[in-house]
Amino acid sequence: MEKKVLPDASAVSRGINDPKISFVTELREVPNFTFIPIDAELSNLACKFAAENKLRGCDAIYVAVSCMFKSKLITLDEEQKERASNVIEALTPMEELEL
């Protein structure tokens, strides 16, 4: 089974408008989720992408994770998509569904 990458649990918390994200512990037990630590390697790669492509910090992390996993970045953020496309394949959800 393909693993899903979830680099930021805060997005989940914002989405449900609840700062209590105790469910993250349970998410770590789900076999098709991978939590990615922001270590020196990921941080350095994200910094490089941010500087070279004028990406915001968090956007650069998403691009770096996608690059490390050799995966596409699916996003609704047009600026992120445009700037990330210099590094990786970045698509909207609709573009991905059309493939």
Image (cartoon, grey):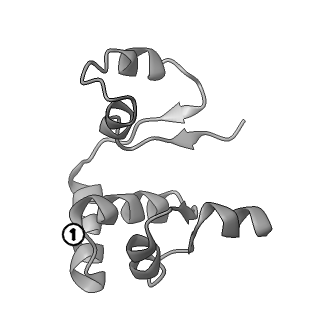
Task: Tell me if residue 2 comes above or below residue 40 in the rendering.
Answer: above
Above/below status of 60 relative to 34: below
Q: In the current view of this chain or complex, which residue is farthest to the right?
A: 99
Residue highlighted by disc 1 = 47
Residue 62 percent location from the top left of the image: 39, 58
Side of 44 where 12 appears, left or right = right
Callout 1 crowding tier (Cα within 10 Å): few <14, some 14–19, many ≥20 = some
Mark 1 is on which residue type? Cys
Residue 16 appears left or right of 57:
right
Front residue (pair 22, 46): 22
Residue 15 left/right relative to 99:
left
Q: Residue at x 50, y 62 (%)?
A: 75
What residue do we see at 37% from left, 22% from top?
Answer: 24
Residue at position x 23%, y 58% from top?
A: 43
- For the point 39% across and 36% down, which residue is it? 15
How far across and how far down the image is residue 70, in percent? 55, 63
**With respect to residue 93, does 95 lie above or below?**
below
Q: Residue furthest front?
A: 17
Front residue of 31/13: it is 13
Q: Dividing the picture into quarters, in which one does residue 47 lie?
A: bottom left
Report helix, strand or loop for mark 1.
helix
Viewed as shown, does residue 21 lie left or right of 44?
A: right
Give the mark count: 1
Residue 40 percent across, percent down from the top left = 20, 54
Image quarter where the C terminus lies is: bottom right
Determine the image quadrant of residue 59.
bottom left
Horizontal and vertical percent position of residue 94: 68, 64
The quarter of the rendered structure image containing the N terminus is: top right
